[in-house]
Image (spheres, helix red, strand yellow):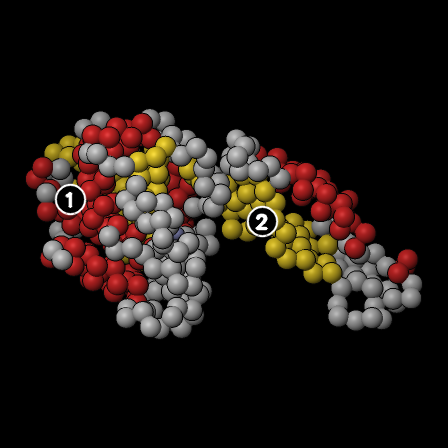
Amino acid sequence: MCQTKKKWQEIRRDLHQRAELAGQEQSTAEYLLQILDSMQVDELKTGLAGHGIIATFVGAKAGPSIAIRADMDALPIQEDKSLVYHSFNEQVSHKCGHDGHMSIALAVCDWFAQNKDQMKGRLVAIFQPAEETGEGAALMLQHLPTIDYCLGLHNIPGEKLGKLLISHEIFACASAGMKVNLPGISSHAAEPDKASNFYPHIQGLYDLTQSLCCDQENEKFQVVSLTYLQVGQRSFGLTPGPSEIYLTLRSYSDQQMNHIKAKLEEFFRPLKAKIEYCEVFPAVVNSGDLGQLAQAVASEKQIAFQVMDFPFRWSEDFAHYQKVSKTFFWGIGSGQDQLHLHHPDYDFNDELVEKALYFYQAFLIQLQNQ
Ligand SMILES: [Zn+2]
Ligand SMILES: [Zn+2]
């Protein structure tokens, strides 16, 4: 194995061992700073939105400010300890490949830093905490310098190793968690007519959620999933009183999301429900011609790519960067036999660092010349 490949593999595995949950990425941040310390960072901001880091590198020539974003957090999943570089932390492991995303960002920083004299503009490396909870990106926005572009990626298991997944528009769905608290009054189980609770409305909610769903092979994909429903207690003497419902809402666009929310709110309003939204992710939408540019770069460099027919059904809080910059988010296949994201035995494919770096280099040079 060549020296650079080995270096990034070691770094990725070191990060893997430090897996930390959203909002707790302290040791991960310390490790990143240690690696960044060996590069010529021109501006360094730490402790952002918790443990976030922004490292800026300044090229010798004038040009745009291009940000690349890597997510830092892991998941509450126990990892098999037979993995040589298994997570140090019980019940926490990198099962979404954010350890790999950070290594890719470090590799891009290293390349830019070593070639500063030929580089135009700035490279702004954003190491963002708390992606999985959808909180990190929005909080990082206030710490961002002015940027022209923001780029991000996700590894995609099940797709051919190194193949780029490019969207000219929507890359991933909007998503929101809807928490509904309903009042109610219990009664003796012998007198259910004296109670007031959600039970008589269950069918209505089921019918409504079904009518709001539209499958993925449709440009208007949307889905409402019931994830939690609590009505009453484990008792034979008491009818239910208050209840609690969790629904996850997903759609291709933010407009559809607003429509789903309005329909559900209309249903719950007469029931005097208290509604709260949690883990809100806007849809990830690529800016104008950046998808075309990515496609041109991939063709020129003979990198296999596929223009996506439909956006991914999952969500990414990268969407928040759309508020301050042109954005491009892309996928890179991590192998057809790779286990899916969040699977307890998933592990980031180390082969991807060099492949992602290769595309990033070519794409950044194109953007620098825009
Ligand atoms: Zn994830
Ligand atoms: Zn992820």
Q: Classify the position of the N terminus by image quarter.
A: bottom left
**Residue 71: x %, y % from top left:** 34, 52
**Mark 2: C-beta under 8 Å from nearest atom of ligand 1:** no
Label 2 is placed on what type of residue?
Answer: Thr
208 or 144: nearer the eye?
208
**Residue 190: x %, y % from top left:** 91, 66
In the rendered image, the vertical position of residue 297 relative to residue 112, given as above or below? above
Instruction: Name the element at disc 2.
Output: strand
79 or 181: nearer the eye?
79
* Label drawn at residue 268: none
Residue at x 61%, y 49% (from the top left corner) = 225
Residue 173 in the figure: left or right of residue 345: right
- Discs 2/1, front: 2
**From this viewpoint, which residue is outermost toward the left?**
117
Kindly indicate the quadrant of the structure image that contains residue 26.
bottom left
Q: CA distance from mark 2 to mark 1?
A: 41 Å
Label 1 is placed on what type of residue?
Answer: Phe
Disc 2 crowd rating (10 Å Cα; few below 14, some 14-19, many 20+) is some
* Label drawn at residue 248: 2
Residue 282 in the figure: left or right of residue 163: right
Residue at x 91%, y 63% (from the top left corner) = 191
Which tag, 2 or 1, sits closer to the chain's start? 1
Residue at x 85%, y 71% (from the top left corner) = 237
* Label drawn at residue 112: 1
Determine contact: label 2, label 1, CB under 8 Å: no
Instruction: Name the element at disc 1.
Output: helix
**Residue 255: x %, y % from top left:** 55, 33
Residue 202 in the figure: left or right of residue 89: right
Q: Classify the position of the C terminus by image quarter.
A: top left
